[in-house]
Image (cartoon, rainbow, N blue to C red):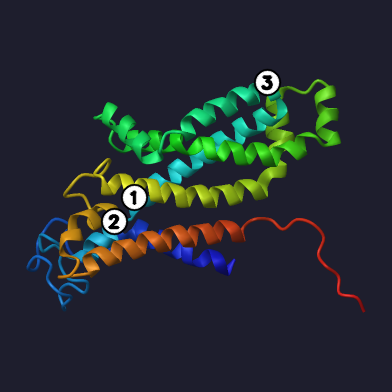
Amino acid sequence: MLRTVPAVALVLLAVAGPWLAPHAIDVPIAAPYAEPGSGAPLGGDQLGRDVLTRLLAGGRELIVTSVLVTLLVTATAAVLGTVAALRPGIGRVIDRAADVLMLLPAVLGILLIALSWPDGGRLALIAAASVMGVPYAVRLVAAAAAPVVASGYIEAAAAGGERLWYLVVREVLPNLRATLLALFGLRFVAAVYVVATAGFLQVGPQPPAADWALMIRENAGGIFLNPWAVMAPSIAIGLLAMSVNLAAAALVPLSGRKAVTPL
């Protein structure tokens, strides 16, 4: 459980950050790219706004968006991957559709969907990131579900007339808890990467919103004047991805027999 503490602490800090911010996010308090001082511990950004304030206020939307994308991708992949393992005919169709989507780079797919849905905002970003993340996750779930589906009790349940939905929800998915937790951690890291990349490309949050990825883009030109304006949000994104991935790995249930030391 100690491995989950950094992720929980960072998420709580990002969620409560807007209430902890010492200044307004859009009010200049120093010179552009001012060095860290007493009024601004991390200095100023390109407009003289407090970097610490914008850092505290910029993580909540990124985390919420990444969690929603991860939940949608994991849930969709869990159902489709299990159905693909139970019904090989449907599985071949799912595999071919996944192959087509995997040929399209994630960032390009997000740009296409977001630009074709100009009023979608963050909803368009969530939909695009979810669609682009499902093909990779489906392959992993289908591979993990295959040996479970081949086991005797699944065959007995199918022979007894149980419906497909019952087999998916009650028989197969409970035996994939470890795989799904590991998948959640991996897809969260991927979602943070994709959402941050979209924010860097200004697909989603727009200035003067406080967003970690947007902060990196806005202050890249002054990195040598005040490095913290770029380094602070970059470190925050990296710590968020790593800590949540470690927490998901720590929550994976142990399986198999433990080794017994001979007397």
Q: Find disc 3 in the rendering and name its residue.
A: 89
- For badge 2, the amino acid type reads Trp
Q: Check disc 2 and report its element: helix, strand or loop.
A: helix
Total tally of numbered discs in the picture: 3
Name the residue located 63 percent from the left edge and 24 percent from the top edge.
Answer: 92
Q: Quadrant of residue 258?
A: bottom right
**Mark nearer the viewer, 2 or 3:** 3
Quadrant holding the C terminus: bottom right
Q: Earlier in the sequence, mark 2 or mark 3?
A: 3
The extreme left residue here reads 31
- Per the rendering, the mark at residue 105 is none
Q: Find disc 1 in the rendering and name its residue.
A: 196
Name the residue located 22 percent from the left edge and 63 percent from the top edge.
Answer: 53
Q: Earlier in the sequence, mark 1 or mark 3?
A: 3
In the image, is 209 to the left or to the right of 47? right
**Mark nearer the viewer, 1 or 3:** 3
Place of residue 24 in the rendered image (x, y in percent of width and height, measured from the top left) = 16, 59
> How far apart are the two marked residues, 2 and 1, measured between alpha carbons?
8 Å
Q: Find disc 2 in the rendering and name its residue.
A: 212
Quadrant holding the N terminus: bottom right
Mark 1 Cα within 10 Å, few/some/many (few <14, many 20+)? many
